[in-house]
Image (cartoon, grey):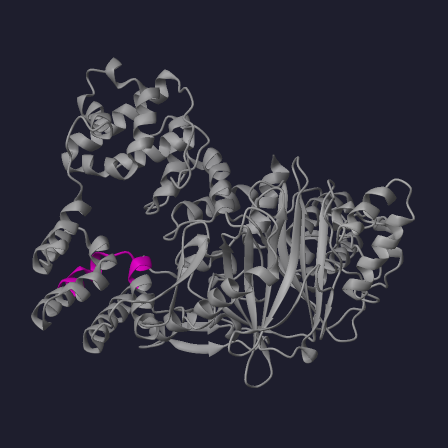
Amino acid sequence: MAHDLDALVIRHTHRIPSPKGAAGQGATAARQFDAALASAGFKLSARLLERLSGLSGAAVVHTARRTLRTVGGMVGDHVRHNTYFIDFPANVPDTEEFWMRCVAQALADDASRDNVSAQLAHGAPDLLDLPAYGRYQHTYEEMLAAQDELIASAGDRVTVLHLGRDLDDELTSLYLALAGSATPLGEEHLRDLGILAERCAPGPQPESIPVRENRAVVNAARLAAGADLLLDTVTDVLRLACALSGGDVTLREPTRFRSLGRPARRALLAGLDAVVAANPAKLADVHAHREPFKRLGERLHPHEYPRRPHAADVFAVARGEKEARSFDSRVEERLDESDVPGAVRLLRPAPGKLFRTLDLLLRTAADQEERDAVVAAAVRAAPEVSGRVLLGVREHLHNRERETGGPRVFVNRRGRGRVAPDVRPPLPAADRDRLVAALDAETRRRLPAPARLLLDPDVLDVALPLSGRAAPAGLGVLPRGSVSAVDGERLRFFVYWKETGRRTDYDLSALLLRSDYSTDSWLSYTSLTAVGGEHSGDVTEAPGGASEFIDLSLDRIRGTFIVPQVNIYAGEGFEETAESFFGFMLRDGEQKGRPFEPRTVRMKSELRGTGRVALPLVFRREDDGRWRAKWLHLYLKGVSSANRVEENRISVSKVVRAVVEREQLTVRHLAGLMAGGTTVVDLWDGGPVPDGPVTYIGLERPEGLHPDSTVITLENLRDVIPR
């Protein structure tokens, strides 16, 4: 368990909990540990190296083994990445030449000759029936022997691991940060919060837990620890029941409720009873989740608890036996009647809903007087709205004029994306500008005013993480809509998957688009080579795990956009596999090396969406010839089987255009709001940092920061969102 907790801290904070062990002369072992980390693109900070050097060699080796396993998983080096073509990217054949070679081998094979001959007589053979196609023809060790060692480059990634505090302190701090997050967490972070909550529920707690999913996870641990529950809506109780049943606390997927013990049933019914007794209007919230409440009622047996009549009312509403008109239906009724003033009056006690309805209210308003009333209500409500909603509406208003009449992208909580024309009429510019000014003023009021703000220029174009679901778990992953520089001459994509039971075939592809988003060419199993690129070969059967790669020489690419994608051709979905992830590497033009070299990995992200086509990010050549990446983290529905790049290129190009042309609020926006007043703003150039305390915002923590500094990096970027 201790190893798992150490790994959890390292993944989330890039800190190694203060190593324990007998004092000794561990300098040699520490340097060897540092050298081993370098091969994976990591290094020890000066303070951590000093700390390890003062321990015994055995203590250093103990820490090194645990850490190397963890960082290997972070970059994807915990699995064996074989390639179909043994010396990829060299000697990749022409596609048709390769297929004909596979046919010739099949005809020379007694076991397959008759079947393939019959297929040829009636047209083309099925590639999957060719023994040499889609199955590794060499071992992983043979592939390594055919490849050169990587020549190190100054451009290789280096991620610094810092010295942390004692493990208990690190775990408590991480628990407080995740539980008290102002933005929803991604799936992996939510699972980690559950692990931490089991350990930390009896100890210090955050001042508030604003995100309902987080509250459900914490409540499950608090119930087990005998602590009071945090419940103020009936939906809080439903989420807790899902957590106790091992289900989905986000309520996106149905939960099969377990048979709960009497103490848990009593706690859930008492929670429902107290919430409704305090505010009977909360019964209206049942309508949004009627079916789950009905199933939960079958498990809780509310009729056995006559002293909980308000809890019984919840299930009566779910079954349609008791009326409880929802708040949303009352607002919709006013809007259907074009009664904007009436809708605004209803929405005043619910500032969050008011803000989420602003666009519709302004479009429905009959005249300027009604629009003025809407704007005035929003300005009054702004101090009561969460920072995440403030910034979300601010981003919406910024793009509103740009999207009208053009493509509009819709993304659900699972990352499923679709594009539709924006048919909404434009909002009057004056109303939009007044709202933007009010939102910026309220955001500025909530932001801290540090005496000195130190900014990494590379973080300025990172999109604000208004939801943890805007970025999957991984290393170097930026939120959806972020833009980052691509500094390298060769770009290499990789995908790895391991099936759980049935044959699963993923196809790594890259769509190359012109400046008008039309197709230039593509790389896939049907096009192994294109101008400037090579595909490592199609793997269709690999129960032990499979990898595919695409290598691109950026100076030879003709188009403007490079869109990597992972298509599910057959088998298990992204959420069904034992493991599946995507990433990219950057190399200098002369760097050879093996197909997968962890120190060149710039990004590795989990593939865990519901669609059949994954779009992690898009690369764009700017006017100055340099390439920049814009992060998508999208999944398209696709078809049930046989998804191919050439058949989804139209839908992909539409999504890419909609996201590329949309502007997200970034760290630059918040930094600009913070820069007023007495704050001194410096851009960090990679050199020495100031001697005194600073507020630092960057991709990674620099060495040498004053211990009293406030540090915000990718690992805790959510903390930049004001509450």
Quarter where residue 308 is shown:
top left
Which percent across, then down, holds residue 219?
37, 34
Question: Could you tell me which quadrant the N terminus lies in?
Answer: top right
Looking at the picture, does residue 699 appear above or below residue 48?
A: below
Which percent across, then down, holds residue 398?
32, 72
Which percent across, then down, holds residue 162?
61, 57
Q: Which residue is depicted at the point 40% across and 32% down?
A: 242
Looking at the picture, does residue 323 appear above or below residue 339?
A: above
**In front: 116, or 405?**
116
Mark yes or no: residue 695 visible: no
Q: Is residue 604 left or right of residue 247?
A: right
**In front: 353, or 163?**
353
Magenta run includes residue 105: no
Q: Which residue is depicted at the point 40% across and 38% down?
A: 249
Which percent across, then down, holds residue 77?
71, 52
> What span is colored magenta in the figure?
377-390
In the displayed orientation, state which residue is furthest to the front: 121
**In front: 225, or 387?**
387
Looking at the picture, does residue 336 appear above or below residue 541?
A: below
Q: Is residue 276 left or right of residue 540?
A: left
Q: Main secondary structure of the magenta part?
A: helix
Q: How many marks?
A: 0
Q: Is residue 568 left or right of residue 94?
A: left
In the displayed orientation, state which residue is furthest to the bottom: 624
Q: Which residue is depicted at the point 53% across and 76% down?
A: 684
Mark yes or no: residue 119 visible: yes
